[in-house]
Image (cartoon, coloured by chain):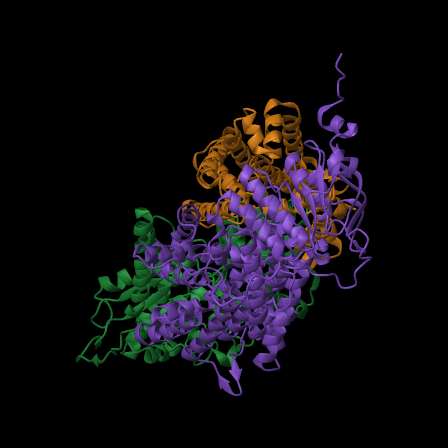
Amino acid sequence: MQRRVVLAVVLALAVVLAACGNDNNGKKAKKGAEKSTAAGEVTLGQPLKIVLLAEKKGESPAAIPNFFDGASLAVADLNAKGGVGGHLVDMKTIPAPLDPARAETALLQAFDEKPAGIIGLPASAQVVPLAPKILAGGVPVVLLSAAGTAFRGAQAQGSWAFSIRPRNAGVASDVARFVMDDLKAKKIGLICVNNPFGTTGCDAAEKVVKDKGGQILARRTNEPSATDLTEQVLAMKDADAVIDFNFPNPLGVVANQLVQNGIKAKHADGASSGLAVASGSVKGEAATNLYGVDDCAPTEDQRSVAKDFSAAFKAKNGYDPDYAAAEAYDSVMLLAEATKKARSTEAAKVAAALRTLQYEGLCDPNYKSDSEQILHHQSYFLTFTATGERKVVRRFEVPDPGASSTTTTAG
Amino acid sequence: MPKFIALLASGTAQGAIVALAALGFLLIYKATGVVNFAQGDLITLGAYLAVWTTAELGLSWLPGYALAIAAMFVIGVLLERVAYAPLRGRSVHVVVIATLGAALVMRTAIGIWQGTRPKYLTSPVASRVWRVAGAAVALQRVVIVVVTLVVVALVLWVFQRTAVGRQLRAVAADRETARLYGVRVNRLSMAAFGTSAALAGLAGVLIGPLGSVDQNLGFGVMLGGFAAAILGGFGNLIGVVVGGFLLGVTEQVVGGYWVRTYKSALPFVLMILVIAVRPQGLLTRGAGERL
Amino acid sequence: MSAAERWRASPYMRLAAFMVAVALWREVRVSGLAGENTYNLWLFYATVVVGFWFVFGLAGQFAFSQAAFAGLGGYASNWASRDNSFWVGLVFAVVVCGALAALFALLVRRASHFYFAIATLALGEILHLLFTRWDAFTGGLGGEAIGIRPISINGYVFSTSTRVFWFLLAMLGLALLAGMFLQRSPVLRETIATRDHESVAATLGTPVLRLRVSMFVLGSVVAGVSGAVFVAWKGFATPDAFGLELGIGVFLMLILGGVESLWGPVLGAAFYVYIPQWLHRFSEYKDVIYGGLLVVAVLVVPEGLVGIGRRLYRLRGGPGPPGLAPSLQTAGRGGLRPLRPSRSRSGGDPGGPVVTSEDVRVRFGGVVAVDGVSLSLAREEILGLVGPNGSGKSTFLNALCGVVPASGHVTVDGHRVPLGRPGAIRRFGVLRTYQAPQTYSHLSCLDDVMLSTADRAASGMFVSWLARPVMHRHERERRERALDALERVGLAGLADASVASLPYGQRRLLELARAIAGEPLVLLLDEPSAGLSAAETDEIAALLRSIREDGTALLVVDHKIDFISAIASRVAVLELGALVAVGDVSTIFDDPRVIDAYLGIEEHAG
């Protein structure tokens, strides 16, 4: 009986404390005033405050430490040089779960912090539903996910949403072009995961194939959690190549089932291939048959900024950086650059600066905002060895859809 | 024809796994009268344990699997002690909630322990195929079916022909009377939970190599197991196994040719129809009263 | 009554105070975009769980489909309101959810507990698949619907967090009010009876199927409406928001909050929404904590937070909770009115027997429990039914009441009664008691007795909401009759006591009172003297004789020959399921066939 009373009191206290703890957020009202000095960098009245919206650990596939590790390395690098505008950079991390309702809570908490910029939301499943709130949020948000249908054309330009990842449909079109030009495939099979990411990818690829006079043999879909794609794979029997926009798990299953069923088609995908191979589920012939895309190749890039970054990252965190870490790093740097250019930590000014600046980063030597406020315009084609190592084939560009044609350059 | 063979093979293998899962929680149901909603997560846990023993501890597949399954037995007994034994006097609702809570704990514990990137489980027949009638059937699926049939035969033999099996049947019929007859019902409950968890572990190591191992591995299988148990008649071991095969083949074959988009809903629709029309199961004789 | 008593007596005042408090708290303590958002989320979840309370708390049905119905309501309302107003969408959501819930509940009506739970899991999965695949309906790829318009009424758009708050608060208030109305209506005792022991409730005449289905439909509709409001508030809908995680979360909220009370959902939802924020450092362990809490809650604190609160209140010396039926002033009632059995509407031959059974047969697998028993019970007579153990006496009673499947014919008062359906025979005025008294420990004595009422008018869900005065009028009459019955058996002073507090002998009397209150034409009694002392047996005998004098026919199954001899005029003897002899009580026990049945063939001396 005593035990229950104590438990009851503790529980009641917990509820009360939780309710009271709420209004600690959102009581900030200060704005930064700048004080300029005669020469050199401007001294700002406020430190640059950034919020990172990503989970370091958790249930969802987007909960990996890479984003945090990359971003905090950037903050450390900036602060080692005295910060920005005379103050140390202040980055706060708020975990953003996959569930959109909870992600929204995290986003609102981020807004309540009144930062100069937000980096985050690594899953498109989070971004698409929250798009209206982001577009009207009042803080520039650098999105870590390939947000497909959410931001298109006029809706994006002049808004608060920026993307550090190349355009999904653009990547998909380039995969299709690669398959037809480089792999000389004519009969193409399409497999898409049943969500906006998969569907826009397949739509874009289908259009390219048809424009180039190729033939779509079959188009199939699957659930993100599917573990047996026999029916879909068998439909690809006579294809020269299979373009597969999927999540890493089903991608691995397709890769293996193609080989098991003796189907000789080449297998091409977007960014999930790297993850599928890294998890160890795709080896041998299934791996050598696979072609993938990655936003970023910090460990293969020969430029000194990339090499320095890779070495420093590995030394600090014990593993090689990937696109997630590198893009998070670049995002922080971009916000810092925009702040310096705007000479202010006011969100509106930082956003304006972001729209016009150019910056050399790890994943793109020339970050520049385009008509859909996408900053990043290149990717890499990859192949894989039988033991699961990856090799960069070449770089390709993912330009503004306003441009007339794509140019691909040897990497 | 090759397509049909391939789909049939997929369906049979799927049915075998579902039958194995159903067997697992049927064991607990017979011994304790409780449906264990944590069965799916036990399957997932079994697969992850096998990944750990083979990939991180570096054991080869045989000792690795054996260790994982043995560990699952222990976990099953632990589950009985924590989530079932203290609640024995209470209503069934309470026990269901407790197993639900245990399932939740297990699922997130796995996530914290192994992270959320999918893992890969090795198998001695990994990616080998058996060519039959122009179709390529993954050898792993054949192994699944064979192992399941062996295990089912073993379990049936234990049930019908051994003293332990007799005791289990007595407890299933009337727990208190069995206790009065000297049957150690507590020990039997622990053994049932342990064996059921070991069976779940076996199911996990069998399906792990097919795709990759992630947190939702076991859940769908468990639902399929429920469907099989309802189809075949809860409490009817043979019926449940037949029901499992029936469901797997129906989903893959019917779903492969006709109902493609919604094929994974087929087992559930079937399940609801069976409950509506013949709740004692398609393969059990008996009065159609409330279960 | 003092102010405090008036406060306690009116839950509606408490509801009003609650809503005022919620609004005030928001003014004072809730700030920031995230804070307001979370506060609104709490109201939303609380409403969903109130819906679940109808399904599980009231009707005891294990269902995992609550979240899926919220999703269905959201998508359905979005689909219908694309070119129409929000209200069209809402009505459509109600219709779709209600229809599907009713269809489902009827389809699986023969399933209970686990099977029902599993079936709801299956339903949830089917709905989830529909959401992800049926793009034309959901309006989005893979079920991700975006750009959903906010709620607007006559041009007033609920687009800000504050406006949405008022809407959600009103919605929760309505849901709680509906629940309170149900709690103060016959529906409460009937659902508790259905939940705790359904076949007994059916034999009392409780519409068990209608109750189960209507509670499931009600809960699912509440979920659907909440879902419709949610998607309009958020502006988007995704299948995973209404997936298994919420399905289990709903369970968690109700169990943790307290299943017995309407405030349980409110407290449980607050817990679910706020504790993770408080524990944000441990956010990745959140589900481990939830799972552990679930197990701990059922082990240690099964009544949940509400139960803890009540215990604390009582510890402080406050009075106990009011009884389930509001207490009644017994002074000023009229004198004892003899309970007359309700005459049947188009009665059969008044001279003929009131009950006849022809060739009733009950078979369990290979065992024949009742082997072609043909009996008749005359009006206003007491017929004893005796026989050695295992002769099928109780099974015969069960067959008459439709509790076990049987073949043969049974007629009551000239009407053919269908066998195998538990509620069927009640309509013809037949009630029964059981070997072990089947009373409901979660009810008060008065409520238990009111369960058998012959007056079923105005006891449904809709009447309790929309026509309360009518319901109250009928309730008063039902209460009067029940009190009369209690006085008959000498338990009038215990009307408000909880049944659980009664000793065995009084529970037996209670069961008898319940039977009397139903004004039966025929009363079937199964070993009414079991477990009673000699003095108590005499009391029962006197009571049974007086019931007969009021016009009820009795069929009494018992072992005690003295007892049977004292009350019955005729006796029937069963052995091994078959009728061995029927005759006058004074001569039947000398019948050699009867002696043979009980003792074996009489040995002649010498």
Image label count: 0
Q: Residue furthest top?
A: C606
Q: Residue furthest bottom?
A: C155
- Residue at 63% from the left image edge and 59% from the top image edge: C339
Confirm whether residue A251 shows in the render: no
Q: Residue furthest left?
A: A38
When asked about the image quadrant of residue C388, the answer is: top right
- Which chain is depicted purple? C
Q: Taking A100 as reference, is C109 above or below it?
A: above
- Which chain is depicted orange? B
**In the foreground, B42 or C152:** C152
Residue A274 in the image: state x and y as whole percent.
50, 53
Relative side of B171 to C30, left or right: right
Residue A183 in the image: state x and y as whole percent.
62, 57
- Residue at 52% from the left image edge and 33% from the top image edge: B189
Residue A288 in the image: state x and y as whole percent.
57, 48
**In the foreground, B103 or A119:** B103
**In the foreground, A271 or C415:** C415
Relative side of C606 to A254, left or right: right
When asked about the image quadrant of residue C276, the answer is: bottom left
Confirm whether residue C44 shows in the render: yes
Residue C84 in the image: state x and y as whole percent.
61, 82
- Which chain is depicted green? A
Relative side of A29 to C502, left or right: left
Q: Taking B176 as reference, is C290 above or below it?
A: below
